[in-house]
Structure formats: C-alpha cells, structure tokens
Amino acid sequence: MLVSQIPAAMAQETLPLRVSPVAPSTAETRTDIVWAVDAITPGFIKVEGRLNGYGAQMLDWFIARMPGYNHLVQILPRRSAYDAMRAAGESGKTICIPGTQHTPERAKDFAMSGTVAPLLPLSVVVLSSARHSFRPYMLANGTIDLAALLGDTSRYTALAKARSYGPEVDSILATAINAPNVLRTDNQSSFPMMLEIGRIDWMLAYPVEIEFHRRQAKDASDTLSLPIQGLPRLMNISVACSRSENGIGAVSEINAILASHPAMPWLEYYIDYLGHEDRARFLDALKEFKQSRDIPVGQ
C-alpha cells in the first residue's frame, strides 16, 4: 500500500488509474512503483476522482506497456516527491515522477529516462494586442531579454510565491525580486485576469498552463508567449525514478519502450491546449526535435 512506500507525513491523495488491462502476472513477480504526480493542469487534470490531461495520458500509456510492475498513482507536491525519491533510493523502493525537466543536477540524484515529452519552456506571456510594445526588450532572434524587461519598472509583472522558475531564470529574478514592479501571489491561475484588467503587463508562465487558465477564465483575451533569451526552444521532460536497482530498471524499460514507439501520441492533447501562435512555434520546434533524433516527422 502507498503509505509503506512514501512517509505518512508526505502522503496525499491516491487516485485510480485510467489504463487498459495489462498482461496477467502474479503479485510475487511484480515490483511496486509509486508514481508521484504533481497535479498541475493541464498535464494532470482531476476529473471526478480520476486524472486526465496529457501527462495522465502519457502515464497511462507507459503503465499499459509495463505489466511487470504494480502501479500506484499518488498526488504529491513536487518538492515532497523529490525528497521521497531520494529516501526511496537508499531503501531500495521505487518512486517515479512521470514528468520532470532533465537537468545535470537531477541526473546525479535520480535515474532519468530519455525525453518523453519535448515541451515549450517558460516564456514571457503578454496580451496578443500588446505584442509590439514589447519590441524594445526583444533581440534580433525574437527572444526577450528578461533582465532588460525586468529593469523597466513601468512594466508590472507577477510571480508565484515559492515557485522555482529554473536556475537560469531564477538567477535573473534574484536581482529584481523586491522591485516595486514585481508583484507576488499564491495563485497563478489568477494571472490571466490580472493581465486582462491591467494589474500586470506581462507574466512568466509555461504557455500550456496559462492557456488552460485563460480558457477557464472564459472572458480573458488571447495571449502570446514570447521565448526568453538563453532558454532552449523545447525543454526535455523525462521520467525520473529513485536511484535504486528497480528504479534504474524501470527507466531502462521506459527507454526501450520509447525507442520502439517514438510517436508520443499524448502530445496531441498538449497541442490542443496551446494558442494558435504557440502551436505554430511548438510544431516547428518539434519537427527539429524529431529530425535531430532521426524520427520520421509524420510520427
């Protein structure tokens, strides 16, 4: 049961899986995997006690092809999941996060799969109607100079409290975190309406997240995501598992499945949650990603 896998103090909500039946296997021959899910929409959307979203579809897809394991999904904040994975690595238990950005630091602590989802990185999100007013902070390659934008104290933004935006962006934010034009809030889902009513002029967000919140708000105007200087066109999202023998084995199996099934069908759900221009940017970058890995572009 889950509490035997993750310390009780960290235990959150266990949800049923939406997976196809797997090949029969005796309980004695199967290894337990706890999948620690941080329910951030639209990767994981809780609907009537079940999880949906492109992340949930990806997880279902892998689980259906890994019948040699007992699978348990647990909603757990990302920071707690990392702590639980480190502890599990020492105890030999197996805890995995189905989607986390591959970084050299995480590769030292965890077993990391190949890319299971290449996604658009953190971006500067603005109202589509305000595009031209941000050209003073835009470089020749179309990316935004984030330090220059933050330095304009007439342009207001909001940041989510206690959220890391990644080492590259966090180092830039550190110099401006207390500036008068930087607001702090607990609820990122309010950002689109703050943008709509003029409380802020721009925000830092993953394009797919902010588009989900914009649609939920219903009355919010269309937004545009501008790439940030120094960040990759796509971030490599991997499956991370505790660095135990079984965790390393699970990652090896995931890599083998990826090698024989490179199409990543769950990306269709992701694409559906992108605005028009973000979708075009993503599809162009995805084509380059597939070509770099010798994957037919049609897959």
Image (tube, grey):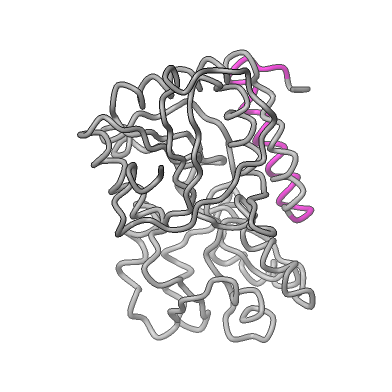
Q: Is residue 185 magenta?
A: no
In the rendered image, which quarter contains the C terminus? Answer: top right
Span highlighted in magenta in the image:
275-296
Which residue shows up at 44% across the image and 46% down it?
36
Q: Is residue 279 magenta?
A: yes
Is 237 or 72 nearer to us in this picture?
72
Residue 186 position in % (x across, y down): 46, 76
Tell me if residue 31 comes above or below residue 218 in the rendering.
above
Residue 86 position in % (x across, y down): 26, 41
Tell me if residue 170 comes above or below residue 7 in the rendering.
below
Which residue shows up at 39% across the image and 19% down it?
249
Q: Magenta span: helix, strand or loop, mainly?
A: helix
Which residue shows up at 36% across the image and 66% down it?
173
Residue 128 position in % (x across, y down): 74, 67
Is 214 or 131 nearer to us in this picture?
214
Left or right of 175 in this view: 200: right
In the rendered image, which quarter contains the N terminus? Answer: top left
Is 105 or 285 nearer to us in this picture?
105
Left or right of 209 in this view: 164: left
Q: Residue furthest left?
A: 90
